[in-house]
Amino acid sequence: MTAQLIALAIFVAVFAIAAVRNVNIGIVMFPVACIVGLFLADLSLSDIISGFPLSILVLLVGVTYFFGIAHSNGTIDWLIQASLARVGNRDALFPAVFFALTALISAMGAPLGGLVMAPMGMSIAHKRGIDPMLMALAMGCGLSAGAFAPTSLFGIITWGTAAEAGIELSPLLLFGVAAALNLVLLVVAYLLFGRRKRENVEAPAFSEAMVARGAALPQYGGSTLDIDGPDNDDDLKAPGRPTGMQVLTIAMMVVLVGAVVVMSLLGLTPDIGVLGFGLGAAAALMDANSGKKAMSRIDWGSVLLVGGIITYVGVLTEMGVVDMLGEGAVHLGSPLVAAVLLCAAAGLISAFASTTGMLAALVPLALPLIAEGGIPGWALICAIGVCASIVDVSPFSTVGATYVATTVDEEARPRMTKLLTRWGLSMVVIGPVALTLVLILPGMAFS
């Protein structure tokens, strides 16, 4: 018991220190996992390294490389311009369109790639008199929905971890739950902020540190669209005809998505990483320049983050720590209460720290509760994943800070900070309660 508690305390300490120091948690976690495994768990080094999640990492690299090519050859920019051109002057549709575009980009491997839409969306909101809060929430909900696609990071980690644990969780079901909840939140955002932009209200000043944090948009998903100012309508004009390579890339994207959907409906488990590698290799052979540029768009940070955390969780599992936590949760008196608390913890911590890290750490910890508490596995894992994501519009996270930093009217930023804080923290409570009512309780009733 002492060794187990020490190993768990080290895990929490490493997570916290790396987060505070703004160092990739996985890079620090991996060598510490080896030390703990060797000296506390009496494991061999080969046993420890075998816990490195190669299957999940193949998914991440293959998918982000293929969609990196789609960004490099201009296919994504062409799709965005073509979509915006169809909106024209129908201002009320812009938040919904940016929800869809952000979801599309977020579904392409790296969720934070969806932040490339932030400067354009906030500029259009400023020019068209749309409440910036509505536009920020629309893009935030779109990012969260797309992130759980079978081709994106959160989806890969969540259903990939479930699959490795022997829990049946359809990637399409996970995506459907995330998309449905975020569409409901989009409707709520329209009801709350769908009127013309209101006068600013006084609020605490927005810190320069948050602006700097949000202004650093991710390299993955970088766009060549003109997003410099609110008075430029160039991005609302119809683009020219796509090039032959862009047409081919779109066809490949359709093939990838179609293969995932068809195989999932047939009850098969699609190897999306292998499909991504194959399509990426074919595209690179036809356009070597884009293939080289796409190498820098592979989400190596997430690869290292997930790899290090899951390796350490593997050591904790071998030591019996995960089972111990699960048994403690079950003995709370109500497995349902334990499930709600686990979802709330995922949301609260994710509002201030890495959502990817939360998913990699908490999904394995839910397995004993599923095994011993009678909670349906697919429902609890879906709930944990979505609860960890819908809080990301908090201004204390990269996503929320970016939306505040890209708000064109500087005087509106304090209001944005206050409202996004309220929205993000309210999701810590609303998310677990809502998903318990619509997923976990019905799942328990029919299981």
Image (cartoon, rainbow, N blue to C red):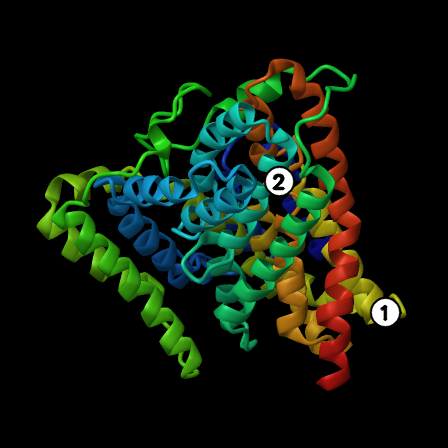
Q: Residue at x 49, y 36 (%)?
A: 24
Residue corresponding to mark 1:
331
Q: Amino acid at mark 2?
A: Leu
Q: Residue at x 67, y 65 (%)?
A: 366
Residue 304: image quadrant is top left
Cα gap from disc 2 to disc 1, whole angstroms = 38 Å
Residue 278: image quadrant is bottom left
Q: Amino acid at mark 1?
A: His
Residue corresponding to mark 2:
137
The answer to whether residue 244 is visible is yes
Residue 45 position within the rendered picture, expressed as x and y whole percent measured from the top left? 44, 56
Residue 387 vertical placement versus 78 (above, below)? below
Mark 2 is surrounded, within 10 Å at the Cα level, by few (under 14), some (14 to 19) or many (20 or more) other residues, namely many
Residue 161 position within the rendered picture, expressed as x and y whole percent measured from the top left? 52, 65
Please state if 70 lies on the left or on the right of 361 as rendered: left
- Look at the image and tell me in which quarter the C terminus lies: bottom right
